[in-house]
Amino acid sequence: MEARQGDLTCPHCAKQIGKIDSLDTLFDRCALCQCLQFYLSKDFNQTLGCLVVAIGIALVPWTYGLSLPIFALIDWILYKRVPTIVNCYRCGSLFREFDIPKHLKPFSHPLAMQYERFRK
């Protein structure tokens, strides 16, 4: 599910699920599953990032390894330019274009393991 300011819509069918009442309390509980835990990530296609690095690796024999730092720099620049999004651990909802509270942290594997059973 994806959330934008004002309404909740499904990214697959574009069906409106509901509305977000208060942006101040939006990240106290997930609007869809009532989960209390969120994490930060970049809104970046991981396949594209891996492809950029793979191209750099593939060019190593012809560039004597100079392609690695160049393509790593390209990947880093892309990563820095992409906005940060908030994700719900339990239902996987993505919250884009919101002011991100300071208390939210990046992804935590141990915490995600607790919610893994809900994501199947």
Image: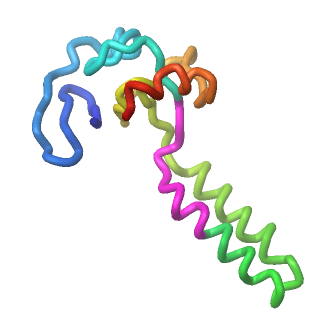
Residue 29 vertical placement versus 9 (above, below): above
Furthest residue in direction left, as rendered = 15
Q: Is residue 61 left or right of residue 25?
A: right
Q: Quadrant of the N terminus?
A: top left
Residue 34 vertical placement versus 19 (above, below): above
Residue range corresponding to the magenta coloring: 40-51
Q: Is residue 4 left or right of residue 112?
A: left
Name which residue lies at 89% across and 83% down. 64
Furthest residue in direction bottom, as rendered = 62
Residue 62 point in image, percent of width and height:
81, 90
Residue 72 point in image, percent of width and height:
73, 63
Residue 100 point in image, percent of width and height:
47, 24
What's the colour scheme?
A: rainbow
When asked about the image quadrant of residue 104, the answer is: top right
Q: Is residue 49 magenta?
A: yes
Residue 5 vertical placement versus 82 (above, below): above
Q: Quadrant of the C terminus?
A: top left
Camera sees residue 24: no
Residue 11 point in image, percent of width and height:
23, 45
Q: Is residue 106 magenta?
A: no
Name which residue lies at 26% across and 28% down. 5
Camera sees residue 58: yes
Looking at the image, how many numbered discs can be counted on the residues? 0
Residue 106 vertical placement versus 73 (above, below): above
Q: Is residue 90 left or right of residue 1?
A: right
Name which residue lies at 58% across and 58% down. 78
